[in-house]
Image (tube, rainbow, N blue to C red):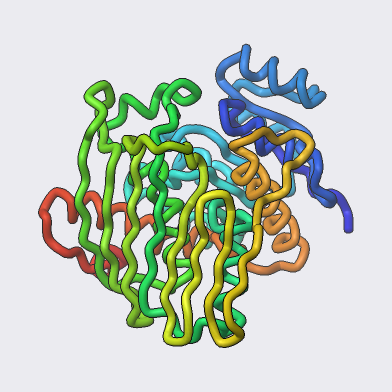
Amino acid sequence: MSTLRGALIGCGFFAVNQMHAWRDIDGASIAAICDRDPERLRIVGDQFGIARRYSDAAALFANETLDFVDIATTVNSHRSLVEMAADNRVPVICQKPFAPTLADAKAMVKACAHAGVPLMVHENFRWQSPIQAVRAVLDSGEIGRPFFGRISFRSAYDVFSGQPYLATGKRFIIEDLGIHILDIARFLLGDVSSLTARTKRVNPDIAGEDVATMLMDHDSGATSVVDCSYATKLATEPFPETLIELDGSDGTIRLAQGYKLTVTGRSGTSVTDVSPPLLTWASRPWHNIQESVMTIQKHWVDCLAAGKEPATSGADNLKTFALVEAAYAGAASRQPVRIDELLK
């Protein structure tokens, strides 16, 4: 397989993980980088030996022949950059949050579809190996038909020191973290028909909500609770683990703190350690997210090579994005929100 030639736009906090992963993946490499901040451009360029550096995305597209572009900027620039990639017929990965609004997200999907270029959202939590292990048990039929799930992320980890902008937005935990947990619920239990939400701001020093609880009805007939918190102090800090409970007609799955997977089903009970591998460039406790970055980027390369639609394509991600919008609308109205109404 020939090596795909890519570019990275955005050299901030999280993009370094993406650069490490691109360096380790067969079949793709980053040939150029772009950032408006010359210091970030210098740091990432020097660290990864990238000589071709741009401060303007239009200049990047004008001067480079690319097989894909990886957009790792903040949300307000996503639409213009994705549409620029579509105009240049360059396949694109876009970091989450995908867009400021669902209308923007729909426009981005439409632009790429019209241009005939693949679009994938970097929705990486579902690609964590413990989450994939839960999905594999579901697929095996061991617990029968799932009817209830709880997907939980509760922590008091200081995410603001590394990403201070998170403290300033009117939207916080649902948009930044909850989108991942909602996507896991979709990944495990299928699409959602309605959502009810409650939010709270516990930390007085931030602008947005830092606690959210969401109840969802799935098209499959299952019910799930998705709960997120950055205000929960525990004896052992679980960050950044997602904990999962699934009840099925023939058994249960529990993914507990410390990556302990307990399955009680048709074959009895098994307990497995599903800890993610610690990559050479990864560091605890981020290693589960860092591993998933490499996994999703490899999925992108494989899909481009095979001409297949990525699992977290732009079109698919609209269904996750709609859950975010529904959560904010439902928290404001304190009423259930129909998802199909948002996707029209």
Q: Is residue 139 above or below residue 333?
A: below
List x then y, in percent, for residue 163: 46, 25
In the displayed orientation, state which residue is furthest to the top. 39
In front of the other: 227 or 316 = 227
Q: Is residue 311 above or below residue 69?
A: below
Left or right: residue 189 versus residue 195 is right
List x then y, in percent, for residue 279: 75, 41
Q: Quadrant of residue 185?
A: bottom left
Residue located at (61% from left, 82% from top): 140
In front of the other: 99 or 110 = 99
Q: Quadrant of residue 340?
A: bottom left
In the displayed orientation, state which residue is furthest to the right. 1
Using the rendered image of the protein, determine whether residue 122 is visible from the camera's viewpoint: no
Residue located at (52% from left, 33% from top): 73
Quadrant of the rendering where the C terminus is positioned: bottom left
Quadrant of the rendering where the N terminus is positioned: bottom right
Q: Is residue 253 above or below residue 173?
A: below
In front of the other: 207 or 210 = 210
Residue located at (42% from left, 86% from top): 249
Q: How many circles with numbers are drawn on the protein?
A: 0
Residue located at (54% from left, 82% from top): 265
